[in-house]
């Protein structure tokens, strides 16, 4: 529950940051730069974060990282509220946030196993963790849309800072966690990290699963980075009736300082609605479910839905498509995460999950940059469509070339 509160704030900041950058620059490429700049700390810190998660108490690692992210949110809130914020400030804060996340994510992914009694509950635990994440993805943008539209971006950043207190307090209250393995401390850090890399490279199915997530993150997921540009350039006309009903009519529920934030908030919320639905479906799977076929379906339906979304010019149709995209996205990522965690040894969990999160983060942030550059040249809809086509082709290749993946339980 504490993580859920914190993630609502994180999604509020993500959406408010997109609005702020687009307001300051008017450039889709700038949105991509914010995403890509996080590559600078992620690459050197990602593997080290996984090694740290296998050596140190995971809760301590997460506590330090969450505190750093809270401080970052308050700094950004102060800069924005005082009117001194510039786009380079946002870039620096994105750099600091990415550094903290590089340490936090491997430990948090591996920490799920510490909180359940056996691997038979792991699928459910990972899916419930994804449910919390996706519920926040649904609520955060909606709240941010209202906050940014009425008060501006600064209060959204400040509220995000406050929400970190919930997860920090929850972590401090935990008791009876499994003791860490002290034996791993004897190995040098570089050798310790290399063991995880070798394991992934020598395990074909783990490698293929990781590559699926990487390709999807690089080519498909950047659609969320481009959402402000899509809302403004592609769907602005068809979203005007909604904006008028909520902001401009005499009986409108509130006054809007930034009415453009409302359609964006609704689009991001639609993704969250689908993602929560998908996460609950995955969480309800029985222990003997065949996860491989469901993963394959998510690998194909996610880019296929994005391709249809790139062709849509109707705001309402786009909202419906984003719900379906959210379901398929979770089916792909939650099941890939589950299958990897079910097939790795406990002593390597932190390092393998660091490679997984590192691959995901690098691909997603680099993908945001390439999508932003393509969007400035060809338009945001074309950028999403091109990425979806290539991602769909790779998904079909994997489905045909590696049938063992479809048969995984």
Image (tube, rainbow, N blue to C red):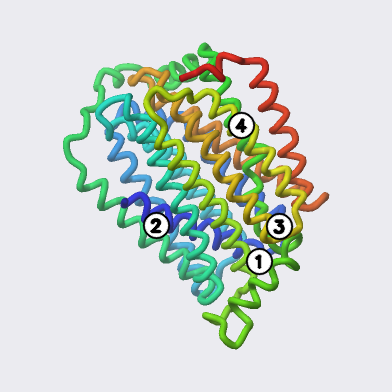
Q: CA distance from mark 3 to mark 4?
A: 23 Å
Residue 9, given in percent of the width and then of the height, sits at 43, 58
Depth check, front residue: 83 or 269: 269
From the viewer's perspective, is 245 left or right of 178? right
Question: Looking at the picture, how far across and down is residue 30, in whole percent?
Answer: 68, 55
Distance, label 2 to label 4, CA atoms, is: 37 Å
Q: Which mark is residue 24?
A: 1
How many residues crowd mark 3 within 10 Å: few (<14), some (14–19), many (20+)?
many
Instruction: Name the N-terminal-most of marks 3 and 4.
Output: 3
Q: How many other residues sit within 10 Å of disc 4, few (<14), some (14-19) or many (≥20)?
A: many
Mark 2 crowdedness (10 Å alpha carbons): few <14, some 14-19, many ≥20: some
- Contact check, label 3 and label 4, Cβ < 8 Å: no
For label 1, the crowd category at 10 Å Cα-Cα, with few meaning under 14, some 14 to 19 and many 20 or more, is few
Q: Secondary structure at mark 2?
A: helix
The Cα–Cα distance between marks 1 and 4, rounded to whole angstroms, is 36 Å
Residue lying at 20% horizontally and 47% vertically, measured from the top left = 173
Q: CA distance from mark 1 to mark 3?
A: 17 Å
Question: Is residue 103 visible in this depiction of the protein?
Answer: no
**Residue ID for mark 4:** 299
Residue pointed to by mark 2? 71
Left or right: 248 with respect to 407?
right
Q: Quickly name the residue at label 3.
A: 230
Q: Nearer the viewer, residue 345 or 81?
A: 345
Query: Please, what secondary structure does the residue beneath circle 4 have?
Result: helix
Disc 2 to disc 3, C-alpha distance: 31 Å
- Sequence-first disc among 2 and 4: 2
């Amino acid at each position: 529950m504490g993580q859920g509160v914190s993630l609502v704030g994180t999604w509020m900041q993500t959406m408010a940051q997109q609005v702020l950058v687009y307001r300051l620059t008017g450039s889709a490429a700038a949105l991509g730069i914010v995403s890509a700049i996080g590559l600078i700390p992620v690459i050197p810190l990602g593997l080290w974060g996984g090694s740290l998660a296998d050596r140190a108490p995971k809760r301590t690692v997460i506590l330090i990282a969450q505190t750093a992210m809270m401080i970052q949110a308050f700094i950004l809130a102060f800069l924005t509220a005082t009117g001194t914020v510039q786009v380079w400030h946002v870039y620096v804060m994105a750099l600091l946030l990415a550094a903290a996340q590089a340490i936090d994510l491997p430990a948090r992914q591996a920490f799920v196993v510490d909180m359940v009694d056996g691997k038979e509950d792991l699928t459910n635990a990972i899916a419930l963790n994804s449910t919390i994440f996706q519920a926040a993805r649904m609520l955060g943008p909606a709240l941010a849309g209202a906050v940014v539209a009425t008060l501006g971006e600064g209060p959204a950043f400040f509220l995000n800072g406050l929400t970190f207190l919930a997860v920090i307090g929850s972590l401090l209250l935990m008791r009876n966690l499994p003791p860490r393995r002290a034996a791993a401390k004897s190995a040098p850090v570089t050798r310790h990290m290399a063991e995880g890399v070798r394991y992934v490279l020598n395990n074909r199915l783990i490698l293929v699963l990781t590559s699926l997530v990487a390709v999807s993150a690089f080519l498909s997921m950047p659609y969320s980075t481009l959402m402000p540009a899509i809302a403004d350039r592609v769907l602005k006309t068809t979203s005007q009736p909604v904006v008028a009903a909520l902001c401009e009519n005499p009986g409108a529920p509130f006054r809007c300082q930034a009415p453009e934030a409302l359609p964006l908030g609704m689009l991001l919320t639609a993704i969250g609605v689908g993602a929560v639905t998908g996460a609950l479906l995955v969480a309800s799977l029985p222990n003997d479910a065949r996860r491989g076929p469901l993963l394959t379906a998510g690998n194909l339906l996610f880019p296929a839905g994005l391709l249809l979304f790139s062709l849509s010019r109707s705001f309402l149709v786009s909202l419906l498509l984003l719900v379906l995209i959210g379901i398929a996205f979770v089916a792909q990522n939650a099941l890939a995460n589950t299958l990897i965690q079910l097939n790795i040894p406990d002593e390597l969990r932190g390092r393998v999950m660091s490679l997984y999160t590192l691959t995901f983060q690098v691909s997603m942030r680099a993908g945001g940059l390439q999508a932003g550059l393509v969007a400035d040249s060809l338009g945001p809809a074309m950028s999403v469509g091109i990425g979806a086509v290539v991602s769909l082709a790779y998904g079909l290749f994997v489905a045909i070339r590696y049938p063992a993946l479809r048969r995984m339980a």
